[in-house]
Image (cartoon, grey):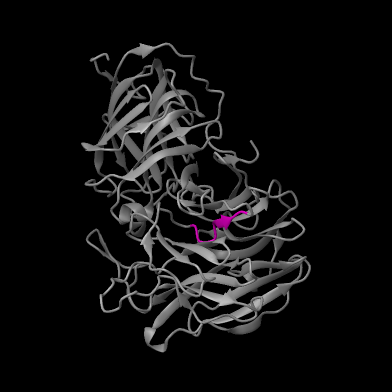
Amino acid sequence: MNDNWHSLSPVSGEPWTFTTGPWIEEEPGVVTSPPQPADDSLAISTAAAYRDFEAEFDFRWEIQGSDSGFVFRGRHARHYYLVHFPCTGQQFRGAHFWAAISKVDASGWARVLRTEVVPGIPSEIGLWHTARLRVQGPEIRLWVDGRAFPVVTDDTYDEPGYVGLETYNGRDPDEVKEYFGDARARVGSGNSFRNVRIRGETAAAPPWDSSVAPGPGWRHPLPDTTHGAYQYVGGLVRLDSGEVLLKLAALDAHTTGTRTTLLLRSHDAGRTWSEPEVLPDTLHGATLHPVDGDHVVAYLMQHDPPFDLSMVESTDAGRTWSEPSGIGRVTFDADLDIEHAYLSKVVPLRDGTLLRFGYSVAVGPSMHGGVTRDGWRYVGAPAPGSFSFCVRSTDGGRSWSPPIRVDGPNPRPGMLMNARETASETSACEVAPNRIVALIRPESSPWMWEMWSHDGGRTWSPATRGHFPMYACTDAMTATANGAMVIAGRHPGIGAQLSLDGGMSWQATRIDTPFYANGATVEVEPDVVLYVYDGKYSDARVRAQRLRVTPEGLEPADA
């Protein structure tokens, strides 16, 4: 290997190519992508190609919802390896630093080869970190701040290619928001690089192909912003006829302002969508559930005591709706002092039982809120009135059981078990008859909380740490008719996780990079899962992708 180091900088005057615009030098020696919103921003050094090399670079997160990456063996924007360091909100607040080695292929997705928490590295925004990378043949070695990452071996891209920098901005903030942790107001990539250098023997390679566009093939179900520039997924169901219904909320400001509840229809499994229909405002926050034929039910829950439940029905595929009718309430133990409670989508079991999952928030400080002082955020501890639960119905949703705690009971109460941070958004699906897996969004845990029921949701095992981190994925978990499991949400970027063995192992893929997620999934064709999800603040229109399940992993269904 050539021992002479060569400095790399997108502002050096050497040949570089960019997928957005030319990168800039914000301060002496510090570069970042241009100050414009972008899903994916690459800066590729095209002066020389490398196969085997050693590289070093410093990177700094400036905001959350971003990524710092180093590209190598690149031929175009859908053919390269990527060493990267994703930053998401709960991950940096929970103090777990993640690194990943991925490959970007013709799908435009980043296939995660390995991702791990790197111990001993702080996750706060605004700190410089040093990465060292050594690539030789199929072997990829990485160190971060002197800490070794597990060795990755992959021979997909064995030929020489180009190196460069990668970042994206999932938030595009234009003002400081202390709660969300932004170090300073900025619009752009959100990440900075300095001291980038490489050594190794240069090699011949075809020119970088700038005609290939980066990124996945998503689409907007509702491109028009007449009803509001900020769109949020409110529900996604498939009727017996194959028609797919998508409920959206459209607002003129992020989470506030004038709100319109809309319904879109697709007659081709999510490829195209109808013009929006305005729904009664009573259906805002309602959970849609198809019954049979054109019969659709919308369930509503009062989030404050006494937590009344009601339902609204449509017998014409959502074109007209009944008035709400009460169907009881969720009744908690009186001494728990619960302030708020929430329920998510309906999970139908094969025996006809319906499950809904939710969580409660006790009066007082909680894991969801907190106070800030002198740059510190203080959150509440787990409380008896804050927990995740499910409710069951055996009469088609006309009545529901009392709440059942999904973090199962202590098997030996005489030996105390610490309460866990499981009062949060829950995703669940039926893996086999009456065998259900539930995953709960964590606050400080590096991984999701995982629980199992073997009796249709009547009882649950105690929560364990699951396989991966993910956030904003409450209604985005689906089991296909053939037994695959798909869940999609935040981290890394917009991540999709696939299990082909009943939840025993998972494959991670970064399929997009907006910050918000909060989407929904449904199987729309055999082994094709439609995922619709919220966008980002600079373009807050909902996005959609169709994901095909194959024995080798997820693929874009419309490639």
Q: Quick check: can you spot residue 346?
A: yes
The magenta stretch spans which residues? 473-480
Furthest residue in direction top, as rendered = 204
Compared with 426, 329 (above or below) is below
Q: Is residue 543 left or right of residue 129?
A: right
The count of marks equals: 0
Looking at the rendered image, the quarter that the C terminus falls into is top right
Closest to the observer: 181 or 355?
A: 355
Is 60 contained in the magenta span? no
x and y percentages locating residue 214 in the rendered image = 52, 32
Q: Is residue 99 left or right of residue 393?
A: left
Q: Quick check: can you spot residue 542?
A: no
Closest to the observer: 166 or 470?
A: 470
Q: Residue at x 30, y 78 (%)?
A: 413
Give the dominant element type of the magenta stretch: helix, strand or loop.
Answer: loop
Q: Residue at x 42, y 40 (%)?
A: 188
Closest to the observer: 418 or 557?
A: 418
